[in-house]
Image (cartoon, helix red, strand yellow):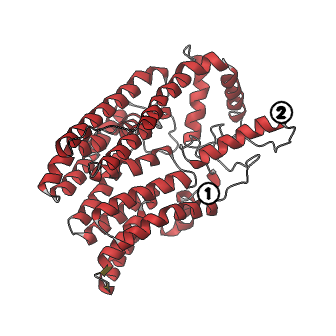
């Protein structure tokens, strides 16, 4: 299965290896939670374990991404929790090593690196208003040494490695759009491209559809084009208030909140964001999920909506009951755990404001449209258009697609053969 040219290889033993290895390496999640809460006060530990365990270990989105779609995100989020637990236990150097190693496992965690950097700089290197140069140098050596060991085998190919780690030519939006600002931006641009010529007679540029399932640079028709530097600037601006707050108050509680904010900002404004990046702001919330009613409400909504946003990864009609069974059981367990906590400690039932409840109820309408309403209202129009796109893509010599784009297109190739539509 490691032969690069063996594209269509499949075997039962490979599936067993993949599934078992994902389950085993998820042990880092349990280790991270255990390390963190074992260093907390007994009262906090007792009240937080159940909601945190459900939010992290039974997270529906993580189960979809790792155990159905097959990835190792649980293992890496476990390393993130371990690093945060080590900071919490007063082991900043070991925590810095674990986080540096995590960045070398998957660079998506650069999203939250600013929070880690500011927390260590303000809480460790600048303690009680005094600058500790030795601590700063020690941290720097740990990080540099970790990166050096990791990248040494690629020393002759570092430019190529950098191009692959930061593929700016793959386009603003991922082939499967993450639900962020740029998804709305692209949607409104696409709608304006269709509506303006018909209603106002305004001509627009004819550009390739961003919904065609391919990765690559795409120009907008009506709105200005977005460059990587624009997304970086917006991300930094969105992260800055939290980082300033963390610099002034480098407590563990504030660190977790700002780390979540950094993940949120990068998810909303980042370049070529993957759908699974939603987990970078959901799972760390497990460490402070019962801190207050407001945090519990935020964690619940983010966890439910974030999990729902990953449903297109399991798109088959036969998967409807599985994905909804996962999401509803996860939501029910998390609600019961949060409700039990708040009834015991604040004598108030866990609830959500009515606009939020209405918003969550809207997910059922979206799902109805995806599963049943779309074929009824639009018939085969979109399917026929997608099939024409696929046939063009499959012509000899067209190698424009890669990765998840190929997966999306292959799904469309199979679609006309399914009676389910």
Q: How many marks?
A: 2
Q: Nearer the viewer, residue 331 or 229?
A: 331
What secondary structure is marked by label 1?
Answer: helix
Give the image location of residue 131, x and y in percent.
Answer: 33, 85
Give the image location of residue 276, x and y in percent.
Answer: 45, 45
* Residue at the image position 57 percent from the left and 66 percent from the top: 159
The numbered mark at residue 198 is 2
Mark 2 / mark 1, whichever is N-terminal: 1
Q: Is residue 398 left or right of residue 403?
A: right
Q: Quadrant of the N terminus?
A: top left
Give the Cα distance between marks 2 and 1.
34 Å
Give the image location of residue 412, x and y in percent.
Answer: 60, 27
The numbered mark at residue 168 is 1
Q: Quadrant of residue 41?
A: bottom left
> Tag 1: Cα neighbours inside 10 Å, few (<14), some, or many (≥20)?
some
Proximity of marks 2 and 1: CB atoms separated by less than 8 Å: no
Q: Quadrant of the C terminus?
A: top right
* Residue at the image position 33 percent from the left and 63 percent from the top: 254
The answer to whether residue 128 is seen in the rendering is yes
Q: Is residue 352 left or right of residue 38?
A: right
Q: Is residue 371 left or right of residue 401?
A: left
Q: Is residue 341 left or right of residue 195?
A: left
What secondary structure is marked by label 2?
Answer: helix
Give the image location of residue 73, x and y in percent.
Answer: 38, 47
| Vertical relation: 315 (above or below) 129 | above
């Amino acid at each position: 299965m490691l032969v690069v040219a063996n594209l269509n290889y499949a075997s039962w033993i490979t599936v067993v290896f993949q599934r078992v290895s994902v389950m085993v390496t998820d042990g880092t999640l349990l280790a991270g939670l255990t390390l963190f809460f074992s260093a907390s006060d007994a009262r906090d530990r007792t009240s937080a374990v159940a909601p945190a365990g459900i939010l992290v270990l039974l997270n529906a989105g993580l189960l979809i991404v790792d155990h159905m779609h097959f990835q190792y995100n649980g293992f890496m989020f476990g390393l993130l929790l371990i690093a945060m637990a080590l900071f919490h236990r007063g082991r900043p150097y070991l925590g810095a090593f674990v986080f540096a190693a995590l960045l070398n496992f998957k660079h998506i965690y650069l999203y939250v690196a600013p929070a880690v950097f500011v927390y260590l700089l303000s809480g460790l290197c600048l303690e009680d208003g005094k600058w500790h140069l030795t601590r700063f140098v020690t941290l720097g050596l740990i990080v540099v040494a970790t990166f050096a060991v990791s990248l040494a085998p690629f020393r002759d190919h570092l430019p190529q490695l950098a191009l692959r780690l930061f593929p700016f030519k793959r386009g603003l939006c991922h082939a499967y759009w993450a639900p962020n600002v740029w998804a709305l931006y692209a949607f409104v641009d696409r709608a304006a491209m269709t509506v303006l010529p018909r209603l106002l007679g305004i001509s627009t540029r004819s550009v390739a559809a961003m919904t065609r399932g391919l990765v690559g640079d795409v120009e907008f028709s009506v709105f200005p084009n977005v460059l990587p530097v624009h997304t970086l600037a917006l991300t930094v601006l969105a992260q800055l208030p939290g980082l300033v707050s963390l610099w002034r108050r480098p407590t563990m509680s504030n660190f977790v909140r700002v780390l979540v904010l950094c993940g949120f900002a990068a998810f909303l404004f980042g370049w070529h964001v993957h759908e699974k990046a939603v987990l970078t702001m959901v799972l760390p919330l497990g460490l402070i999920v019962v801190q207050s009613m407001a945090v519990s409400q935020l964690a619940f909504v983010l966890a439910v909506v974030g999990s729902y946003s990953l449903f297109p990864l399991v798109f088959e009609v036969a998967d409807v009951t599985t994905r909804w069974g996962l999401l509803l059981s996860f939501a029910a367990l998390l609600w019961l755990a949060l409700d039990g906590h708040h009834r015991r400690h604040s004598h108030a039932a866990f609830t959500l404001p009515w606009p939020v409840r209405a918003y969550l109820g809207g997910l059922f309408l979206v799902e109805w449209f995806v599963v049943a309403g779309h074929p009824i209202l639009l018939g085969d129009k979109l399917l026929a258009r997608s099939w024409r796109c696929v046939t063009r893509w499959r012509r000899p010599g067209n190698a424009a697609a890669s990765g998840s784009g190929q997966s999306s297109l292959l799904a469309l190739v199979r679609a006309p053969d399914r009676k389910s539509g």
